[in-house]
Image (cartoon, coloured by chain):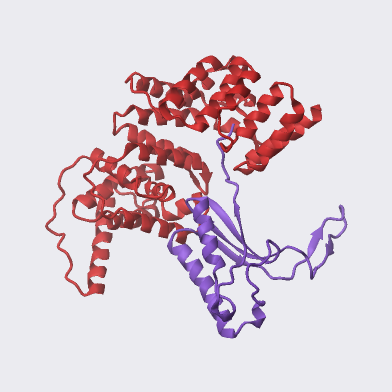
Amino acid sequence: MKYLLLKHYRGGPTPATDQPSMDHWTPEEIDAHMAFMRDFGARLEANGEFVDAQALSIEGTFVRSDGEGRPPVTDGPFAETKDLIAGWYVIDVESWDRAVELAGELSAAPGAGGKPIHEWLEVRPFHTGTSLFE
Amino acid sequence: MNDELLRELVPSVIGVLVRRGADFASAEDAVQEALIRAVETWPDDPPRDPKGWLVAAAWRKFLDAVRSESSRRGREEADFSASAPVEVSDVDDTLRLYFLCAHPSLPAASAVALTLRAVGGLTTRQIAEASLVPEATMAQRISRAKKRIAGVRLDQPGDLPTVLRVLYLVFNEGYGGDVDLAAEAIRLTRQLVALTEEPEVAGLLALMLLHHARRSSRMEDGRLVPLRDQDRARWDTALIAEGVVVLQNALARDRLGEYQAQAAIAALHADAAHAAETDWPQIVEWYDELLALTDSPVVRLNRAVAVGEASGPAAGLAAVVEVPDDVPRRDAVLAYLHERAGDLERAAELYVVAARAAASVAERDHLTREAARVRQLL
């Protein structure tokens, strides 16, 4: 079963810790955080649970069609949108419980002062491709 | 020699290597490498004795691996030169592999992957593509699975229900990459039927054949078509006929099991030329048998659908009451029964709830369309 572990720059429940943003950490703390993320991915791969990991740029633009023959309309970027996705892991695991367990581990990534950041991660199941439903 | 015939040789070639003294994990790796080589070279240079070629090539790969391992560890290499092949039948070899690859100690996804590789002869890449995960992830999954079963003795009797569950999982995986997993599951189950007298194996094969026969009518332009609306002219009558014969032979052995009962229900659907001619009372009886065998809430829900068709929507709704709230598709069944009972408002609401909980995109879209259709009637 595949699940998305979604990291947010902003949005979700109230943060559990009052960690400063990463630009206020020491370079060593940032390195430790990045190393944790790499290890997490490597461990998923060694477990046969890794599918994908991506990070998104914070800057984005909204785009929509404006009718045939006309160029698409763009809007933004918006500095203050409520919900802002930072990136994700896609995992393929045996159960929902395992997905929640892994999200818990990922949320404990080290931050300022080497303390776990305890960030909220959103866990979303994938729709399956096939179905015996008739 | 086509790909499928080549892959049929895989379990017995692994068996030969294991009998010559190789451990299962190394033997399986060596055969996989020989297989990849065969796919590359056979089209231009087909061997006269394909199995002999595979055994020789795999054995060479195995010895190479042993040698590089011993030199890496600075150890003496084990002496395999004296171990002549002991004559054991291919039947036993292949059957043991089914049991080993679907060992109860393995997580389901690992058992599926290992079965597809060691019994099915698929490459790691093909299995990864079919499962929509990276090849490296699948390679790790397989290698961990092999480590986990490293201590399992090959001469112990295995657990047949687990094997059947794994094959059924493969069947339900459907289609991904360039491998048709439903067809592969049928091939592997057909092969297993030839190796054992157990009627549930034949029951599972019958169930797969009868479901597979309806495959081309199940989706239209990417839309899911419910059984009652399927174009029955497109059902594969040859597969249905085979499924019915396989099922009859299984039932004649008089040891009913859940796969045989499910296949009997599928056969009754296949037997109706139009949805309206379906023998629902008999289907309800089979669900009663199935409930006695499994006491599964999913079966109870399916039984409620059949009761609704046999005795009217009020009876169907009464039967759903016995189904726990958290059973998947319960709301979809309720929606359909309420619609038939004339409560369109409730039906539309329930179709929306059911769509939100759907497990697949096709199912979600179908249920959303049902909600929209019912709303048009309000």
Q: Residue at x 53, y 21 (%)?
A: B269
Front position in the image: B310 or B274: B310
Q: Is residue A61 above or below residue B195?
A: below
* Quadrant of the rendering where the C terminus of chain A is positioned: top right
Determine which quarter of the picture holds residue B28.
Answer: bottom left
Tell me where residue B308 appears, x and y as whole percent.
61, 20
Give the left or right position of residue B104, taking residue B279 as reference. Answer: left
Number of labels in the image equals 0
Residue A102 on image: x %, y %: 51, 61
> What residue sits 47% from the left and 32% below the top?
B296
Q: Colour of chain A?
A: purple
Chain B shade = red
Asked whether residue B49 is in view, the answer is no
Q: Is residue B106 above or below residue B210?
A: below
Residue sitting at 81 percent across and 28 percent down?
Answer: B378
Question: Which of the 4 quarters of the picture holds residue B30?
Answer: bottom left
For this orientation, the residue located farthest to the left is B82
- Asked if residue A117 shows in the view, the reply is yes
Left or right of A124 in this view: B168 = left
**Residue under the image location 36 percent in, 51 percent down:** B42
Q: As rendered, which of B260 and B306 lies closer to the eye?
A: B306
The picture places residue B348, in percent across and down from the top left corner, at 74, 32
Residue B82: x and y, percent? 11, 57
